[in-house]
Image (cartoon, rainbow, N blue to C red):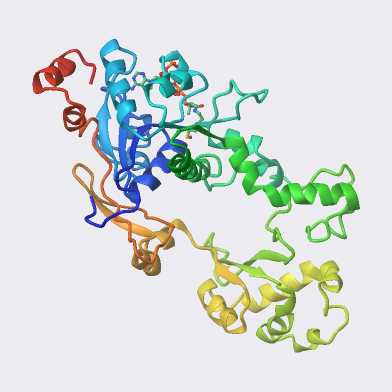
Amino acid sequence: MSTQNLPLKGIKIIDFTHVQAGPACTQLLAWFGADVIKLERPGAGDVTRSQLRDIPDADALYFTMLNSNKRGLTLDTKTPAGKEVLEKLIKESDVMVENFGPGALDRMGFSWEYIQQLNPKMILASVKGFSDGHHYEDLKVYENVAQCAGGSASTTGWWKGENSEPTISAAALGDSNTGMHLAIGILTAYIGRQQTGKGQKVAVSMQDAVLNLCRVKMRDQQRLERLGYLEEYPQYPHEMDAFKDKVTPRGGNAGGGGQPGWILKCKGWQTDPNAYIYFTVQGHAWEPICDAIGKPEWKTDPAYTTPKARQPHITEIFATIEDWLKDKTKFEAVDVLRKFDIPCAPVLSMKELLRDESLRKSGSIVEVQHPVRGSYYTVGSPIKFSDLKPQVTASPLLGQHTDEILGELGYSKDQIATMHAMKVV
Ligand code: CAO
């Protein structure tokens, strides 16, 4: 644990979460100082401890990268003794976060009504696949299901050719993204509690969290219904059939905003799957682009001077830029283009990101020591503060802090030993 006086110090959180969406939320709060108690079933624990293991008998990276800075408590909350412990914990905590399947907490006997009775100041934060009252509220949901339900899959990928089906993003839009939304909800409810003295239930559905990130696609749907076309999409103006049903089409690698962009090949693309850059044709950067790629004549040619004039030639423009890129690596290309103030970046592989010195320096990728795994890398806080540098510490072993936490709740050594013997903890 860090010795800094962390802003969320003093906030006690029961982390009744598993897999990714919930743990990502509570990990963030733990980085910023909350006392996060990861509550797991004795003997088993979070399924990610053993999923996709790379070292036999060591907690998998899936678990360690989502549960750092927490304390570990095992407790069978379906036994009377386990329920009693959870009740005590609820009375002493500020927040409980859960992302079980629909109804699981109620079935366990911990309905929102009961939690409020135990502790009216408690904030109960939940992730579910769909929001309460939704016609799919009973469904269990994983990442890709959420991406399909939230509008991401239907708008990602190619619109023609062999691989033109809806496409899943590798980014955890359903899981970690929902967790980040929930963290904002928890902190809002916590500040609200300072004013009212009362807790409340905070819920984020994975569908809603994905949809929130897809709002530009909903913008496009409404524009399409009004106008009948989307001028910034690659289908415009040569494949207008793509708009005939007035359903927002998939746009490949096109820029999502008002600036056309595409992924362009660089030197070595034939053998390196990531030898590409993203190139943006920013409207007011047109003249620098022409200078950068050696096409000064385009600066005054009316067929190219405005975004509207350029759109019918956008494929040809990208092909010309690709021709300019063919003797430059993605890094060399960006080094030239940055001098012209052109928004661009190399397509970075995970291997490159893991070794990126800037990310190491900023704490965006950190090395952590784990008692069983040894050293590993994880993603550190993407949020930077001027007066706070979160220190990422190892995730807890299964039940590592059980005795310590039970002791804090007032249980004697004998009582704790009995609970161990009865496999309650
Ligand atoms: N002691 C006793 N029982 C415990 C326990 C403990 N400490 N911790 C969990 N359990 C029990 C729960 O009470 C529940 O039991 P019942 O089903 O008998 O009521 C069970 O374990 C967990 O059920 P679950 O439905 O949450 O688990 P699952 O593996 O079948 O489903 C998932 C997993 C993720 C699909 C489901 O939890 C879900 O839809 N969650 C909400 C959406 C979500 O967060 N998904 C993202 C996951 S990240 O990819």
Residue 143 at x, y percent in the picture:
54, 37
Q: Residue at x 76, y 51 (%)?
A: 219
Q: Who is closer to the viewer here, 254 or 95?
A: 95
Q: Who is closer to the viewer here, 256 or 120?
A: 120
In the rendered image, the quadrant that contains the C terminus is top left
Q: Residue at x 47, y 19 (%)?
A: 113
Q: Quadrant of ligand 1?
A: top left
Q: Residue at x 65, y 38 (%)?
A: 150
Q: Is residue 167 visible?
A: no
- Choose top left, top right, bottom left or bottom right for residue 328: bottom right
Q: Is residue 162 visible?
A: yes
Residue 360 at x, y percent in the picture:
35, 64
Residue at the far left in the pictured view? 414
Residue 319 at x, y percent in the picture:
73, 71
Q: Is 321 drawn above or below residue 74 in the view shown? A: below
- Choose top left, top right, bottom left or bottom right for residue 355: bottom left
- The total number of labels drawn is 0
Q: Is 78 drawn above or below residue 32 in the view shown? A: above
Residue at the far front in the pictured view? 196
Q: Is residue 400 left or right of residue 157?
A: left
Q: Is residue 18 left or right of residue 192?
A: left
Q: Residue at x 65, y 34 (%)?
A: 149
- Choose top left, top right, bottom left or bottom right for residue 423: top left
